[in-house]
Every structure is written in C-alpha cells, then in structure tokens.
Image (tube, rainbow, N blue to C red):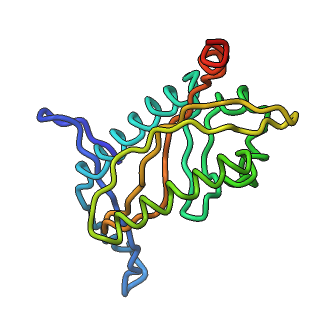
Amino acid sequence: ISLPLPEGERWFELSVACKPSLRGLFPTFIVVSRDISDRRRAELALEASEVRYRFLAENSNDSIWTMNLQGKFLYMSPAAEKLLGYSAADFAQLTVDTILTPASAAKARQEMQNILATVQAGGKPGAVIDEFEHLRKDGSTLWMEVSAKGVFSDAGDLIGFSGVSRDISERKKVQAAL
C-alpha cells in the first residue's frame, strides 16, 4: 500500500490476521505493517534503469551480447539478428564455436582462456578488442570487431563474458583493396 505523506510517498507492506472472538461477537483483526519505502524506491529505480538499457540495446546498430563460460550465448540484441540472420530462438542454441569460422572460434576460445587464466592468477583482466569472422545463417561470412570483457559475480568469480560486436565489412574491403 502506498501513502502520500507531507514528507513524501511511503510504501508499506501489510499483514492482516483475523482472530475469532471468544464470545462469537466481533472478530479481532491483527495488523502488522512494515515500511518498505527504501525497497520500493530501489525497485522503481531498477525498473527505470532496465527500460533505459533495454532501449539502448534494442536500438543500437552494434550487436550487444552475453555468454556463459562455455561460450553459449545468453543474450543477443536485435542488431545481431539483422546482421547475422539468426532469430532470438536460434541464438539460444548457438555457441562461439557455431557462430564463428573455425579459425575465429579458436582465437575466441584462446582469448576466453586468457581471461580465465588472468582471473585464476589473481588479476583483473581488461577488455579484449579483436576482429572475428562470423558465420551468417545463410552461410556467408561477416567480419566484426568485438570488444569483450569478463562478467563477474558479486563474490568476484568469473561467470561469463559480455561484449559489443560491430560490422567492419567495409573496412576489411578497403584494407584488402590497398
């Protein structure tokens, strides 16, 4: 329940229990309330933040993604669907080994191992920026520049990777023509 008060809106959680009267007259109600205003404000701030980030991810021309330690994609923004031709359902089944050419997949696996080794040695790995050749659903390939970094749990454990991938096909064509 929310109450507008002079010092601002406050939210309360109510628990109500009915206790029957001993004489059969009027029952007694026990009401316990707890001020949950701080929690509610945090929930509202999180919702607003999620809306902003979802807007950015869904409207970016670059592909934004996350994957687990095994290289399976957990999230892929709509830009990836446009660039590579896979549906969101397809991405849920793809791994780094199936979305990259064999040479690029090997390079990506090595980069993932380097990040893991740095973490295991007690270091904090930085972002990896490299070029990888992706396999489109139609069988053609697309060069993308990938900026990736480790994702860590609250306890500091490496739990996956996140990144942004950008189409660099035109740049590769110009480089090849030189």
Residue at point 37% right, 87% down? 22
139 sits to left or right of 165: right
Residue furthest front in the image: 178
70 sits to left or right of 103: left
Quadrant of the rendered image containing residue 138: top right
Residue furthest left in the image: 7
Query: At which x and y percent is residue 104?
Result: 65, 46
Q: Quadrant of the C terminus?
A: top right
Q: Is residue 30 above or below residue 86?
A: below
Q: Is residue 58 above or below residue 110?
A: above
Query: At which x and y percent is residue 84?
Result: 74, 32
Residue at point 72% right, 32% down? 81
Quadrant of the rendered image containing residue 41: top left
Query: At which x and y percent is residue 48?
Result: 40, 34
Between 128 and 79, the one lying in front of the other is 128
Residue at point 60% right, 46% down? 75
Residue furthest right in the image: 138
Residue at point 61% right, 39% down? 132
Q: Count the numbered circles shown.
A: 0
66 sits to left or right of 23: right
Quadrant of the rendered image containing residue 29: bottom left
Between 106 and 42, the one lying in front of the other is 106
37 sits to left or right of 97: left
Between 1 and 24, the one lying in front of the other is 1
